[in-house]
Amino acid sequence: MQPLAPDTAGPPALARHERLLIGSVLAGNFVVGTCGSMLTALIPDLSRSLQVSVAQVGQLVTLSGVVMCLMAPLAPVVARRIGRRQLLTATLLVQGLALLLSAWQTTWGGLAVARALQSVGPAVFTAQAAALLGLLLPQRVGRVTATVYLGWPLALVLGTPAAAWFSAVVGWPWVFAAVGSCSLLATAAVWRALAPFAAHIPPVATTPWRATAAGVRSCWLTTAMALAGQLVLLTYFTSYGRDVLHVQPADMALALMVLGTLSVLGVGCIGRVVDRVGAPRAVALCLGLMAVSMGAWPLATSLPMAMLVLTPWALAGFALNAAQQARLLALDAAGGARNIGLNTSFVYLGQALGAGLGGWWVAHHGYGSLGLAALGFLALAAVASWHSGAVGRRPF
């Protein structure tokens, strides 16, 4: 079961199905990204409907982050037993059913249980799908990985603004029902698209921990600290717009769409940056851009200014995930599935940490200084990224 060379290797039928495969995985990742990111847009409506505080609803983000952190490392183990194709489609199926279950919840506790079940999609699908396509098309791993990760900024462009608008107009249960239905459609599409590649999908390798390349652990820490820095602020951006800037739902949806469009642009460019200058420099660029946004947060005193302040973050935030995954594959290709699964775990560990601290910060210090807390995490991420490159490929 050899990986396919880009565009030409393998039977002609496989080459013809390559675009369909990438498109189906991208669509699946769009649904997963919408599931993962839409909760921040629904926080104000959920707070009113469930009669709980904004900070308590924000803890749903922390809860799902913890669950995803625990789930992600198990993905390679499950894939080894049932196969990668079965793993990817099963995660979309479970996510879809859990989203439909969420539509019927009327209490915070019930929604928390359903949200935990939804978390299997974001925890597993994105990283494992990108890793699989990277193995099938190894000569352009940067661009393929970036293409798969486009699903998340596209979710910010289309899925999250649509969720915010529909929640305000027809209610949040319909948002969960709609995304759940789309998840079930994506399940069928990914299963069918992977069928022609079944003979070329490599099994999950069992690499001993002692063979882990030097720098991988620091790379994981970079991911966690960078995501924590982002989520400290961004979890509560919608609530900040409502409570402080008094932004209307339609205007907030438009703002999220613009930020998502910038994120699509950033992810679309990061693959070429990785292929040309290397993943470490691409990661450093992303961290620098995010630091600019967080440092300038006190200037976000109106919606247009907030959009301007968050522009550098939008260009870099989602692009960082793609660059980090390409970096892990370059550091240790043999342990890619395991390392990427654990990197996803650190993604959601960082999100949980950031959302939890952000909720505490809002309750005790307000929204205005959230950027300061975010900068602290980004500084730690920069140190970890430097260390990852400094230790090279020496074994631990």
Image: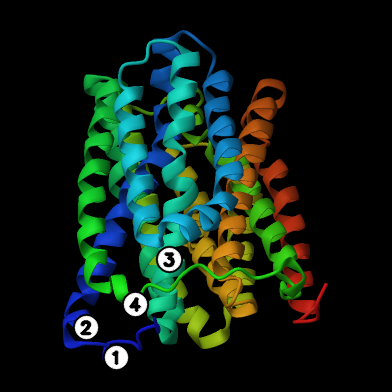
Tag 1 secondary structure: loop
> What colouring does the structure picture have?
rainbow
Vertical order, 373 against 114 (above or below) = below
Label 1 to label 2, Cα distance in Å? 7 Å
Q: Distance between the residues labelled 4 and 3?
A: 15 Å
Q: Which mark is residue 15?
A: 2
Frontmost of labels 3 and 1 is 1
Q: Label 1 to label 4, Cα distance in Å?
A: 11 Å
Q: How dense is the environment of label 1, judged by Cα within 10 Å: few (below 14), some, or many (20 and up)? A: few
> In the rendered view of the protein, which quadrant contains the C terminus?
bottom right
Q: For mark 2, does the 10 Å Cα neighbourhood hold few (<14), some (14 to 19), or many (20 or more) residues?
A: some
Which quadrant holds residue 217?
A: bottom right
Badge 4 marks a residue whose secondary structure is: helix
Amino acid on which disc 2 is placed: Ala
Is the residue 234 above or below the residue 249 in the image?
A: below
Q: Which badge, 1 or 4, is on the more N-terminal residue? A: 1
Of all residues shown, which one is farthest toward the top? 51
Q: Which amino acid does label 1 sit on?
A: Ala
First of labels 1, 2 by sequence position: 1
Q: Residue 130, labelled with which disc? A: 3
Q: Name the residue under label 4.
A: 200
Please state if 372 lies on the left or on the right of 249 as rendered: right
Q: Name the residue under label 1.
A: 9
If you read the primary sequence from the N terminus, does the residue marked by circle 3 or circle 1 appear first? 1
288 on left or right of 311: right
